[in-house]
């Protein structure tokens, strides 16, 4: 079933959901529809796990178009519900009608993440491009972040660890108490948590080391430069992350954000920055008290 879901979503991967011609552009995989109808004939519902996998395939596709959209838990629940409603409405006589309604509801759901002027500019554009999002290997991240694993204070949390959690998995193999969070996790484990960073509470003075390689802080920087309406929530979460450090704990991340780092309390935090490449710097913030 998962392969059929991937195929159906893949058929429409580059369809612009804001296009005024949306109803004419989407494609339907007949094998996928037949599988769904067969489940209904057997009086079987679509499983919660299938809905979760469908949701994650859709989100990966959307992040491949715009990695900066911020989908939180409540949004994911609504996305799953869209697919459940489509399944419930589907029959042999109304496939096109149900799928038109489905993509219209997807368009409405997606519109909450974009300003109206942006959506209006896309109305006449039938397709949309994508960007390449690659997961960094654990060894590459250890190198870029200049991590001396033996010296990392525990527990360790990697914010935006990627769906396979390469770095926290490597740290666990090396005997470290490490966890990772990401908005999509391929296989959840007790140390790999599928959660948006805004839905995750960073408990006060809990973490010895917090890591964020081109994830949370990168999104904060993008928001600072492009979306001031949502900047405050990032600043509040950044403070929560700093408060989550134990005394002498360290927050290590890329890219650097001097516009914010320069205003931190110099008596409470020791800050160092190192240029990596092409204007991108690495920052280490150590809590001193």
Image (cartoon, rainbow, N blue to C red):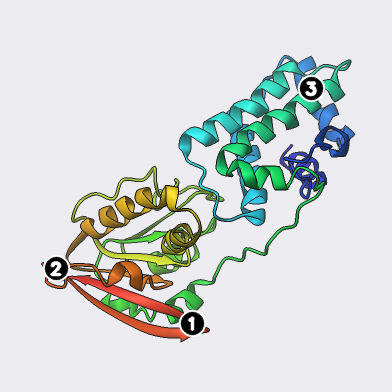
Between the residue at mark 3 and the residue at mark 1, the CA separation in whole angstroms equals: 49 Å
Q: Earlier in the sequence, mark 2 or mark 1?
A: 2
Disc 1 packing (10 Å; few <14; some 14–19; many ≥20)? few
Between the residue at mark 2 and the residue at mark 3, the CA separation in whole angstroms equals: 58 Å
Q: Where is mark 3, residue-wise?
A: 98
Q: Where is mark 2, residue-wise?
A: 268
Which residue occupies the foreground of this view, 103 or 229? 229
Q: Does dot 3 land on a helix, a strand or a loop?
A: helix
In the rendered image, residue 72, in percent from the top left (x then y), is placed at 47, 41
Disc 3 packing (10 Å; few <14; some 14–19; many ≥20)? some
Q: Is residue 42 above or below residue 55?
A: above
In the rendered image, residue 124, in percent from the top left (x then y), is placed at 80, 45
Q: Assess whether mark 1 and mark 3 are in contact (beta carbons under 8 angstroms).
A: no
Quarter of the image with the C terminus is bottom left
In the rendered image, residue 109, in percent from the top left (x then y), is placed at 61, 33
Which residue occupies the foreground of this view, 103 or 147? 103
Q: Is residue 125 above or below residue 90?
A: below
């Amino acid at each position: 079933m998962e392969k059929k879901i991937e195929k159906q979503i893949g058929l429409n991967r580059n369809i612009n959901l804001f296009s005024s011609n949306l109803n004419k552009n989407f494609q339907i995989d007949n094998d996928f529809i037949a599988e769904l109808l067969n489940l209904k004939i057997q009086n079987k519902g679509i499983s919660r796990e299938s809905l979760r996998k469908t949701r994650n395939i859709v989100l990966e596709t959307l992040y491949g178009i715009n990695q900066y959209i911020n989908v939180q838990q409540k949004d994911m629940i609504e996305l799953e519900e869209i697919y459940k409603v489509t399944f419930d409405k589907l029959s042999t006589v109304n496939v096109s009608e149900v799928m038109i309604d489905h993509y219209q509801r997807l368009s409405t759901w997606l519109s909450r993440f974009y300003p109206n002027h942006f959506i209006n500019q896309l109305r006449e554009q039938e397709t949309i491009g994508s960007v390449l999002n690659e997961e960094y290997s654990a060894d590459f991240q250890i190198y870029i972040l200049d991590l001396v694993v033996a010296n990392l204070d525990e527990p360790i949390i990697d914010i935006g660890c990627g769906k396979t959690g390469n770095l926290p998995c490597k740290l666990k193999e090396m005997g470290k108490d490490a966890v990772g969070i990401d908005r999509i996790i391929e296989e959840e484990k007790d140390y790999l948590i599928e959660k948006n960073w805004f839905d995750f509470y960073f408990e006060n003075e809990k973490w010895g080391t917090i890591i964020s390689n081109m994830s949370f802080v990168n999104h904060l920087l993008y928001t600072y430069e492009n979306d001031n309406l949502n900047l405050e929530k990032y600043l509040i979460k950044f403070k929560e992350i700093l408060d989550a450090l134990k005394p002498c704990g360290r927050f290590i991340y890329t890219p650097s954000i001097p516009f914010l780092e320069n205003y931190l309390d110099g008596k409470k935090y020791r800050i160092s920055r190192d240029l990596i490449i092409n204007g991108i710097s690495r920052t280490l913030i150590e809590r001193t008290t």
